[in-house]
Each structure stands twice: as C-alpha cells, then as structure tokens.
Amino acid sequence: MYSLNARVPPAVSRLASDLHPRLTPFDRLRSRHTLVAKRFETDRFARLRERLRETLRGTPAFEAQVTGVDYFEHPPRGSGPVVYLAVESPGLRDLHETLVAEFGAVDELEGPDYVPHVTLARGGSVADAERLVAEGVDPVTWTVSQVQVWDARHREAAARISLPA
C-alpha cells in the first residue's frame, strides 16, 4: 500500500511534541507526522510513480494550516477515537480531488469523506479527546512544495515530487 503525503514542517512536529504529555492516556501515539493527500491500493510502484508525476505536472505549491485539535470518534478503520491536528488547505483539497478523479477513492476515507489531518493518537476515551479539543492550539501555516510517495510495507519514502512555486 502506498500513499501520497505532504511532510509537515518542524513547527507542526514541535506542536505534536508539546501535546505528547496530554496524549499518553491513548493506546497508540503516532511518532511520524505527515499529511496524507491520497492512498493507493496497488503494488505496482513504478507505474504509480509515473502516473503521479504525469498527473501532478504543473500542480502548484499550496498553503496548509493547522487550525486546531479534533477527533474521529468512530474511524472507518482501526480503534477510536483518533485524535488529530485539523488542517485547512484549499490547495490540498484540490490536489486530493484531482487524484481521486485519476485513481479513484478509497471507500470511507477519501472523496467526500476526506478530512485533511495529522494523526496524533488513537484508542482511549472520548472524554480525553474532548479535553484536547477544548484546549486548542495556535495555528501553524506552511507551504507544501513537495509531496512524497510513502511505501507502507518498507516504511520509507519511495519517491518525491516537487510542486512548483
């Protein structure tokens, strides 16, 4: 399984680190923080990479902003709740829609169900998730100028694609 991800800047990683002490009641904490634009259910990496490069040709860099903490009480996959940093980005939504049109949507996760976010933790209580949401965070804005194809099996970036400014 592959995904197309945008790396988050150090300021978002610091924000996640600052929240870490309040995430310890959850069952699993995420140590690698990325912003998923699209998931792909294929094992044909070389073909996927070339289709992505063609599809993304001319796609401009775009802004993204962490706007707060939120959670999915009942995620479509895995245990809940899932606590995350909410991300607003019209450019990311446009990119997602382009990719869904080209590659199709993963049911219950993409298309109209797509919620841009950076996962922090999962499992635990809804009450703990609600406390984090109520605390809030300062916004963090950055420019996404590169995306990477993440190889879940090998747990590494398999390719990078630059987005022109």
Image (tube, helix red, strand yellow):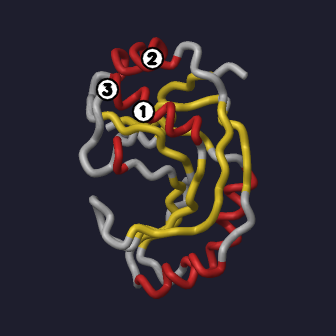
Q: Report, in whole angstroms, how far the alpha carbon at label 3 lies from the one at label 1.
A: 10 Å
Q: Is mark 2 on a helix, strand or loop?
A: helix
Give the residue number, with chain letter if any, for mark 2.
Answer: 55
**Left or right of residue 41, residue 143 in this image:** right
If you read the primary sequence from the N terminus, does the residue marked by circle 2 or circle 1 appear first?
Answer: 2
- Quadrant housing residue 153: top left
Kind of residue indicated by mark 3: Phe
Q: Report, in whole angstroms, how far the alpha carbon at label 3 lies from the one at label 2.
A: 10 Å
Q: Where is residue 73 shown, x and y percent of the image?
A: 36, 73
- Compared with 146, 115 (above or below) is below
Give the residue number, with chain letter if any, for mark 1.
Answer: 97
**Image mark count:** 3
Give the residue number, with chain letter if any, for mark 3.
Answer: 103
Query: At 63% from the left edge and 29% from the top edge, which residue is drawn?
Result: 146
Query: At 69% from the left edge and 56% from the top edge, which residue is drawn?
Result: 12
If you read the primary sequence from the N terminus, does the residue marked by circle 3 or circle 2 appear first?
Answer: 2
Kind of residue indicated by mark 2: Thr
Closer to the camera in the image, 154 or 121? 121
Closer to the camera in the image, 55 or 79? 55
If you read the primary sequence from the N terminus, does the residue marked by circle 3 or circle 1 appear first?
Answer: 1
The disc placed on residue 58 is none
- Compared with 21, 36 (above or below) is above
Q: Which marked residue is nearer to the observer: mark 2 or mark 1?
A: 1
**Left or right of residue 27, residue 161 in this image:** right
Kind of residue indicated by mark 1: Glu
